[in-house]
Image: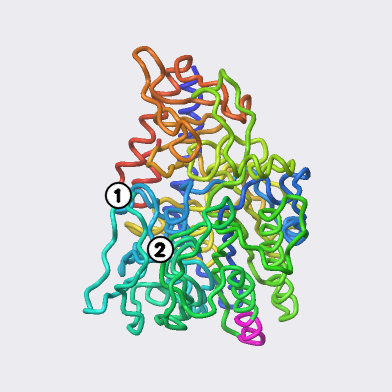
Amino acid sequence: MTHQIAAHAVLSVAFLLTQTLDGPVLQAAPTDRPNIVLILADDMGWGDPQCYQPASKIPTPNLDRLAGQGVRFTDAHTPSSVCTPTRYTLLTGRYCWRTSLTKGVLDGFAPPLIQPNEDTLASMLKRHGYRTACIGKWHLGMQWYDTKGIPIERREVGVRFRPGQEVDYDRDITGGPVDIGFDSYFGISASLDMAPYVYIRDRRVETRPTEFHDEIPDTIFLNGVPGVESPGFDVHDVLPRFGDQAIKVIESQANRDQPLFLYMPLNSPHLPVAPSAFSKGKSDAGDYGDFVWETDYVVGRVLDALQAAEMTENTLVIFTSDNGGLWHWWNFRADDDGGKTPITPRGQYVKNHSHQSNAHLRGTKADAFEGGHRVPFIVRWPAKIAAGQVVDSTIELTDVYATIAEILGDPVKHESSGMDSFSLLPLLTGTSKTSRPFAVHHSLAGIFALRLGDWKMIEGRGSGGFTRPNRINPKPGEPEGQLYHLADDPQERSNLWADHSDQVTLMQEMLERVRNTSSRIEATKAAF
């Protein structure tokens, strides 16, 4: 019966979705094109902002303001539980596991993951006449060259990240943001715990690295890979400088007829936890909380700049995070699937401050559990979207691509880009209560999970990420995977795999069909 009901519900939604995909799409008039500001926090947990968890020990007045003026999604998910794959999917609308990167992340010298023939949010918006700017942490690869002119190659997953002494820093970097649709770029190539420790403007390193960043204390706050560094580069200055650069872009946009797309992937609150002196003591959750507070402060600066430029009314602002929080603790029980796991030092730190980065959710960044991929997701567009809404429907960051395409009247039917994306516009405007009938999750180690209604299936046992045990080899007769009913068990404690074999079979078959498709229409129809 469960199998039949679920299949009938999914088929019903599938019919509506395929009608939308194949039906006529109207081209947006130039005057209807909103400015778009997409802000991506790095490792911010679902429970960090107070608009999501009132008990949070971190004041987040600007995110609270944004939520009150727009739509707050309570069941939003990243397509991956780690950085690079989520960023790829956000910009292309295509799951990253369809590329050569099937697990893990890139380092700061990896070649481009986005290929020259791939459409991106930036290239799509540029076709529609947008000025496109990217400010922040890229982490999608760029083509660096060594001093002999040979392209730097990607290293295998699991190999220690490299310091970068062999790189020619006087040469143009290709394959980065300005080569996949952005008019301008300012930022860093990857995370701030990876070399090179330099700023990049468009295709060039801003200041040649002549120093070596090697005295990195291995603490819960500051760690990283030794590597080349520009003189004066300071990890504490990066987030404020991103804010300064974003404000310059917005100020230069005032009185322009050309709409703006600003993509702002922040470095915070990812390691190293490096709040500026200005932010110290602003929260009750220690240095981590202060770094989250500063992230919120930078968001507020951007919102204020939009207001000062008289751009607020027709600007679509999206705020979200690339995966769940790392600074999290959870009350394990001996009867949990996987057993009782000791708390991590970072978890103990925030527990001592009575803060939970992922609120009630199990797991952290990198995991297949909810704490790894359920994130804040807030949208504001005063000209089109009613304020003060809370939406409980399941969505993915993957869906940003199709949403913007629908706003522009640009049909998403490409063989690659956009193939896994479903538009959120009906949810945002209140014309529908559903967007996607299923969601696919993916962990650091490459473990898949599928969400179907209230059911969640994880292929395999363990977290698939940082939470121990990350992999369990089941004994004969034990469940091979995990099945949870999130409406009854939001903390993923009771594994129902052995009790609902029909549901497991349905979800396994659905996931396999989605994995084996290669085009937009096939991907949509394959799940049904």
Q: Is residue 379 left or right of residue 77?
A: right
Vertical comparison of 496 with 129: above or below: above
Q: Which mark is residue 396?
A: none
Residue furthest out toward the top: 477
What residue did someone put label 2 on? 140
Does label 1 or label 2 sit earlier along the sequence? 2
Mark count: 2
* Magenta-tinted stretch: 248-256
Q: Position of residue 350 (x, y in %)?
A: 68, 44
- Check disc 1 and give the amino acid type: Ser
Q: Quadrant of the C terminus?
A: top left
- Check disc 2 and give the amino acid type: Leu
Verify CB contact (< 8 Å) between mark 1 and mark 2.
no
Q: Secondary structure at mark 1?
A: loop
What residue did someone put label 1 on? 518
Image quadrant where residue 461 sits: top left
Q: Nearer the viewer, residue 88 or 127?
A: 88
